[in-house]
Image: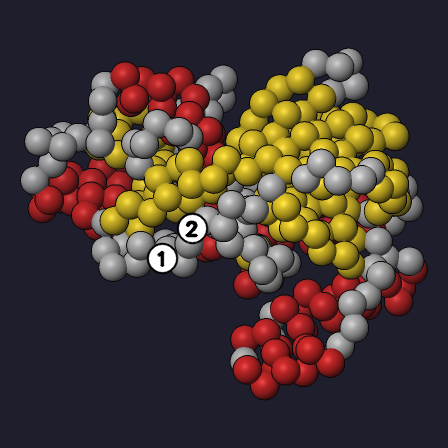
Amino acid sequence: MKTAAIVVNPIKVDLSAIKEAVAAAEAEHGWAETLWLETTEDDPGTGQTKQALERGVDVVIAAGGDGTVRTVAEELRGTGTPLALLPSGTGNLLARNLNLTLDDVENALQTAFGGEDRPIDVGVADIRDADGSVSRRAYLVMAGLGIDAKMLAATDDDLKAKAGWLAYVKAIGTVLRDKNQLRLRYQLDGGRVHSVRAHTVMIGNCGSLPANILLLPDAAVDDGEFDIVVLRPEGFIGWVQIVWKVFWENGVLRRTSAGRRLMGLSREVRALNYLKGSEFVLRLSSPEDVELDGDLFGKASAIKTWIDPRSLVVKVPEGAA
């Protein structure tokens, strides 16, 4: 009999309700009793996933927010053991980009126990801190420096727990008053070195954010490349150009053939530049906050990131692979 392990964040989910649903799903599909592994403040999923792999389970279910999913995926990368998602929390970024259902435990478990395997890319980042030490991390959706990382640093965790994404509104207001820009040099796929000033750099394996915001419209989770956007607004007009591109062109026009024809008539704007590649190296003039999939990972003085193509297997609904 096949066996699943569930790495669960007990703060994010209703354990009693999930246990009942898991028992029903494993019985329906003829699986053995599921191995339950709870995350802790000291270990958000690394040790638990390693334990599941040592037990030789057939699938690891991540039950929690984006941080739990990222941590579990980091350990599953390259093993061939599938990851299944039981979305929870405010983001659920990977589930959104894979068009998986949210807030539907029974449906998610049907996918976990009876779905198909879909290999996807994983972003890997070597992050050098101000002291010169390097840590290696994996991410599934996006890595970012600038406004998004500063926003996360300024977010009130207690308010986020009560109000969800509304907590970021206050943080965005604080960050937009910060006039400091990133000063960096970057190199894409071993090409020439560019020096730029920017408010934000986002490196994406996926393109969609919560609230149906399509930041990276050409990003695909299994194309062997990531998409990068550099935001360089100059004053109010620059921010208007960014909002127009992201919310109107990406969010509205791109969804219809007529809209896409209209987009073909518009010009690229200096405030927002798109890049695409498989390896990206950047060096900062001073250490800056860096985030991966919505979690902060300290201040980075340099980052080297690359795509590990199709190195993670994810469970998707039958017929969707």
Please, what is the three-letter code of the amino acid marked with disc 1?
A: Thr
Badge 1 vs badge 2, beta-carbon distance below 8 Å: yes
* Label 1 CA crowd tier, 10 Å (few <14, some 14–19, many 20+): some
Q: Earlier in the sequence, mark 1 or mark 2?
A: 2
Instruction: State whether residue 174 appears in this view.
Output: no
Q: Residue at x 67, y 17 (%)?
A: 134
Instruction: State whether residue 186 appears in this view.
Output: yes
Quadrant (top left, top right, bottom left, bottom right) of the C terminus: bottom left
Horizontal side of residue 40 vs 163, given as left or right = left
Up the image or down, 230 lies above or below 155; here it is below
Please, what is the three-letter code of the amino acid marked with disc 2?
A: Ala
Secondary element type, mark 2:
helix
Q: Residue at x 23, y 56 (%)?
A: 318
Residue 82, horizontal then vertical, whole percent: 31, 36
> Foreground residue, 163 or 111?
111
Q: Which residue is mark 1?
A: 101
Q: Residue at x 39, y 29 (%)?
A: 78
Q: Which residue is mark 2?
A: 95
